[in-house]
Amino acid sequence: MQTPAQNAQLALLLEVAGTPKPGNVDRHRDLTDLRFEHFLAGAVGAQRGLEMAQNGAAVGPSFEQAVAEMADQGGGNTQFGALLLLVPLVRAARDDLTKPVVEGVVEGTTVADAAAFYRAFEHVDVFVSDPPTELDDLDVRRGSEAIPAIEDRGLTLFDILERGVPGDDVAREWVTGFERSFAAANQLADANGALSERTASVFLSLLGDRPDTLVAKRSGEAIAAEVTDRAAALADRNAVQTDRAAVDAFADELVEHGINPGTTADVTAAGLFIALEHDILEI
Amino acid sequence: MQTPAQNAQLALLLEVAGTPKPGNVDRHRDLTDLRFEHFLAGAVGAQRGLEMAQNGAAVGPSFEQAVAEMADQGGGNTQFGALLLLVPLVRAARDDLTKPVVEGVVEGTTVADAAAFYRAFEHVDVFVSDPPTELDDLDVRRGSEAIPAIEDRGLTLFDILERGVPGDDVAREWVTGFERSFAAANQLADANGALSERTASVFLSLLGDRPDTLVAKRSGEAIAAEVTDRAAALADRNAVQTDRAAVDAFADELVEHGINPGTTADVTAAGLFIALEHDILEI
């Protein structure tokens, strides 16, 4: 029986092993500067932060620790978004991994958690969009320099992430009781085939369900919408199992255009964790 | 900076990710009942036992703990031999990861360590040959039932493994100061290409260097010698980099004949760990 921190680490590993996951690093694909082994090292590095959450430490400091050590490899940001989902889920798993409990965890975050979240951005380059002018002093890219403004306004980490919705579907999980993550867990349990294919199927289905917010930020909403439509068409006909060549071609095309649906991978990792914790995914 | 236990876990992950590793599960190959995800779960499961060694616990109990939790997945024995190398190496890394220190660790093992080693066989099916008749009461397949005989004879874990040489090249590492593991670490550092290829090159070179003892036990010494000759020919012309098709064809053939050079993979994992600890392998 793995601990919640171990299941979270295993979820990170199973996520990157899932293939084919169009646009992302997976068991059968490296990107130019972002390779499979960076994700392996990132998952191992995240351990201490995940254990902090498991042992009852606050969400913000646990997340900051996990990110700092996840980033101690040459690929840069591998699992920032995934950890922002996994840390509160691991914290909830101390008690009971249900929507109400994880809602309690995220709604209970504090201004200190928000400060730690801002510090986490100093450990790794995370792709973010320009904030609206009135929120400029809260720009996460300011890192710890933004902390006085956070404290002045008395903003908790939940408040910060709430301001990220719409536009960030990791933040959206925080304010919807991890709706898509819990749904993904059930989908993983119900899917057919080898685990790496099931992971890929659920990834594709999530990508077809809502435009990936990292793709929208990087490549624009029109591209993100098109990627979603195409993913939905593939997911509808269960192409991971029935027409692998079509999924591989879609994957090649996304990589060629530098389209990397990272948010969808984050939610997939969260779904894997929930499925492992709920013992509905056998390995 | 990862801890020794984390580096050991990462070494297990990098080993299985190395490809093409003829005959073994790797990033691009599953066997029928032994899949990539079993190795991921095995590496995560081994964590607590590796941490015990790192924190100064004795080799035997640390190994037993690592094996018990490594085996908590559906693939069976994924990393028994690798852990038998990694646990004393992690224990040595507390002080200094050099040949004399690790020799001190293994030579300092006790009868209690031997007992824990025998108990480890109760957690997982490990392929072993019949022992000579005069050693029948020490057959590891007896598990804890063999412990009284061990205690009667006052055999330490080092004594037990010494009796496994020749015929078991994991045991051989214990009595040679982890000679091939240290050499593999330097080879990994000197090799060219992506890390998964470097791992594969070193694996092939180790396989060409000495017949794999797991292959010898399962398929006979003639087959093991032939596999070694062919691996040596491929390694000599650096085929992982210069003629991938030849390595892939060799891999297909080994899999077809159920030939699984597991001992060579164990030494590769030990080499990866040493290279990570010595900071001569960047990720």
Image (cartoon, coloured by chain):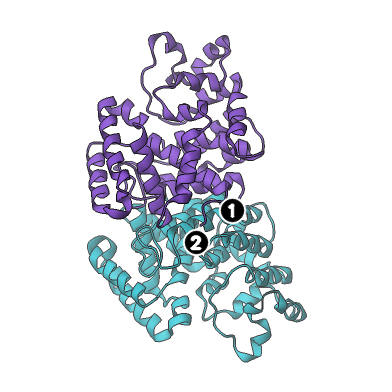
Chain colours: A purple, B cyan
Helix, strand, or loop for circle 1?
helix
From the viewer's perspective, tell me whether residue A205 is left or right of residue A144. Answer: left
Residue A44 seen from this side = no
> Residue at point 31% right, 74% down?
B253
Which of the numbered marks, if any, corresponds to residue A187? none
Label 2 environment density (alpha carbons within 10 Å; few <14, some 14–19, many ≥20) = many
From the viewer's perspective, tell me whether residue B63 is left or right of residue B194. Answer: right
Q: Please, which chain is the residue tagged with disc 2 on? A: B
Which of the numbered marks, if any, corresponds to residue B270? 2
Q: At label 2, which amino acid type do we have? A: Ala
First in sequence, mark 2 or 1: give its number.
1
> Residue at point 64% right, 68% down?
B120
Circles 2 and 1: CB atoms closer than 8 Å: no
Which of the numbered marks, if any, corresponds to residue B47? 1
Q: CA distance from mark 2 to mark 1?
A: 16 Å
Q: Nearer the viewer, residue B185 or A43?
A: A43
Residue B111 seen from this side = yes
> Residue at point 55% right, 61% down?
B86
- When asked about the image quadrant of residue B264, the answer is bottom left
Q: Position of residue B256 (x, y in %)?
A: 34, 75
- When asked about the image quadrant of residue B210, the answer is bottom left
Q: Please, which chain is the residue tagged with disc 1 on? A: B
Q: At label 1, which amino acid type do we have? A: Gln
- Farthest front residue in view: A236
Helix, strand, or loop for circle 2?
helix
From the viewer's perspective, tell me whether residue B60 is left or right of residue B151. Answer: left
Label 1 environment density (alpha carbons within 10 Å; few <14, some 14–19, many ≥20) = many
Q: Is residue A114 above or below residue B46?
A: above
Q: Is residue A116 above or below residue A81?
A: above
Q: Nearer the viewer, residue A273 or B54?
A: A273
- When asked about the image quadrant of residue B56, the answer is bottom right
